[in-house]
Structures are given as C-alpha cells and as structure tokens.
Amino acid sequence: MPKPTRPIPIWLGGSSPAAFERAARLADGFIFFGGTIDQAIANWNRLRERVRDLGRSVEDFGAEYVALPHEGDLKTTADAWRQAGGTHLSAVTMGLGLDSIDSHIAHLTSIAHTVTH
C-alpha cells in the first residue's frame, strides 16, 4: 500500500526461444545476458521482429545488455548495443578485484564517462 500510480514495467530475461517468445507476448522489455554482444544483437533483432508480428510497439519495448568484464572493450560493446537499438546497458563489476563500495562506484563512474563520450 498504496497502489502504484502508474503501471510498473515488467522485464524478462533468458536465452531460450521460449523466453524470447514469452517476452514478446507479455513483457515491456528484455534483459540479454550470456553469450557475446553479437549474439545478443542477433537475438534482439529476432525479438523485435516477433514483437512487431504480435502487433506490439517495438519503440515501447526495452532491451538491456549485461556486459561481463571479460568481454573486452566496453565502449565498443556499448556503441554496438546502442547502434542495434538497445535501450539499456549494465556493466558487471564483480570479479574485478574491487574491494569496497567506493571502488565499485568509482569504476562505474569511469565506465559511465567512457561509454557516453
């Protein structure tokens, strides 16, 4: 309580055809994780087509890519995702040897600066 004053977006994730189909029918967005950016872009293109086929607005459907630390240059990944029509990007900071909340925040701040400039 109280009830939300607006609809709450529901995002789904996964990597199977069933997950993509379920999201195309029911969700407001999709979270892509695992695999490479190229695989995520290919899956995003197929998912967008399915959303369109169902008569839903692709412009209102979000797409987040979860970038893992070992994937390489994050700027290149972010640019590719943005170019593909991705709407959100998450950068995983686990496993980087960061030893405090402040170091995670500092790392994310540098990432934000890198991918937006």
Image: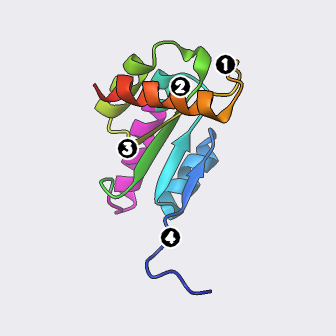
Which residue is label 4 attached to? 8
Sequence order check, earlier mark of 2 and 4: 4
SS category of the residue bearing label 4: loop
Q: Earlier in the sequence, mark 1 or mark 3?
A: 3
Q: How many marks?
A: 4
Tag on residue 96? 1
Alpha carbons under labels 2 and 1: distance apart:
10 Å
Q: CA distance from mark 1 to mark 4?
A: 33 Å
- Tell me the quarter of the image containing the N terminus: bottom right
Dot 4 crowding, Cα within 10 Å, few <14, some 14–19, many 20+: few
Residue at mark 3:
87
Mark 3 lies on a secondary structure that is loop
Residue contact at pointers 2 and 3, CB within 8 angstroms: no
First in sequence: mark 4 vs mark 3: 4
Please tell me the numbered disc located at residue 107.
Answer: 2
Q: Is residue 112 left or right of residue 103?
A: left
Q: Tag 1 or tag 2, which sits nearer the N-term?
A: 1
The x and y percentages for residue 19 are: 61, 49
